[in-house]
Amino acid sequence: MKMIAPSVLSADFGNLRQSLEMINESSADWLHVDVMDGVFVPNISFGFPLMKPMRKYCTKPLDVHLMIVHPEKYVERFCDEGAYSVGFHLEAVDDPLPILDLIRKKGVRTCLTINPDIPVERLFPYLDKVDMVLVMSVFAGFGGQAFIPDSIDKIRTLRAEINRRQLATLIEVDGGVNVDNAASIYAAGADVLVAGHAVFKAANPIEAIRLIKQ
Ligand code: DX5
Ligand code: ZN
């Protein structure tokens, strides 16, 4: 499966509605929503107040990526605010299983994510317990960073394990994705590519979305 989830983090928030309408017109599959708390990552993005306008003006499913400590306190609220998928970081919690349950009980898709310094094998025990795993190909915290090439091996390793166990778990890749490297990331086994700068800073974002998906 080749899907793309543009990251609203790189959008012009002064013209959020227009950006969302552009996404609606495009071949984007989901809108990726990056929530940062300034504690888990050294940056603060936005939180609940933007969920309503995004839900209202964006016709694409909202793929929420929580870069926060204590996700157990907030996942249900993100579900109630209209998330299609809610993901949090494995390294932010002691035991992800009860938190995944909170999301699943809301009827929302689950995602577990890891930063580049976490071995991909740490996700293996959870592959049959989530809808998606998210491999960060930059350190979480900022848009516009360069893709870390080692991520390709992690994606291949994950793809092999998911196929070996005949699971339907999706692999999402986030950070430094662009028109030039997208094909090799899909080829390594990714299903969903997140792209912030490569979409929203492009002269023609709709075309950039189409080219990344190709
Ligand atoms: C980084 C975020 C990413 C970011 C990607 O912490 O999780 O989703 O918006 O931005 P680009 O595609 O510009 O690297
Ligand atoms: Zn993200």
Image: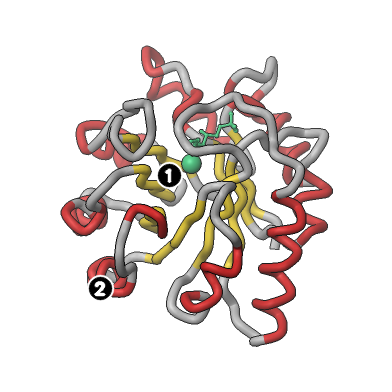
Q: Amino acid at mark 2?
A: Pro
N-terminal of the two: label 2 or label 1? 1
Q: Position of residue 134 (x, y in %)?
A: 54, 56
Q: Position of residue 206 (x, y in %)?
A: 66, 30
Foreground: 103 or 30? 103
Secondary structure beneath label 1:
loop
**Measuring 37% from the left and 12% from the top, which residue is drawn there?**
14
**Measuring 68% from the left and 29% from the top, which residue is drawn there?**
146
Q: Is 89 left, or right, of 203 in this rendering?
A: left
Q: Residue furthest bottom?
A: 165
**Label of residue 59 in the image:** 1
Q: Position of residue 201 (x, y in %)?
A: 62, 18
Query: Residue 68's quadrant in the figure?
Result: top left
Q: Does the rendering let one see residue 24? A: no
Q: Does the rendering let one see residue 31? A: yes
Q: CA distance from mark 2 to mark 1?
A: 30 Å
In this rendering, the label closer to the viewer, 2 or 1: 2
Q: Vertically, is 103 above or below 16?
A: below
Sort mark 2 into few (<14), some (14-19) or many (20+) by Cα contacts within 10 Å: few
Q: Amino acid at mark 1?
A: Thr
Q: Determine which residue is flagged by label 2.
A: 98
Foreground: 148 or 191? 148
Q: Position of residue 156 (x, y in %)?
A: 75, 64
Q: Is 139 left, or right, of 181 in this rendering?
A: left
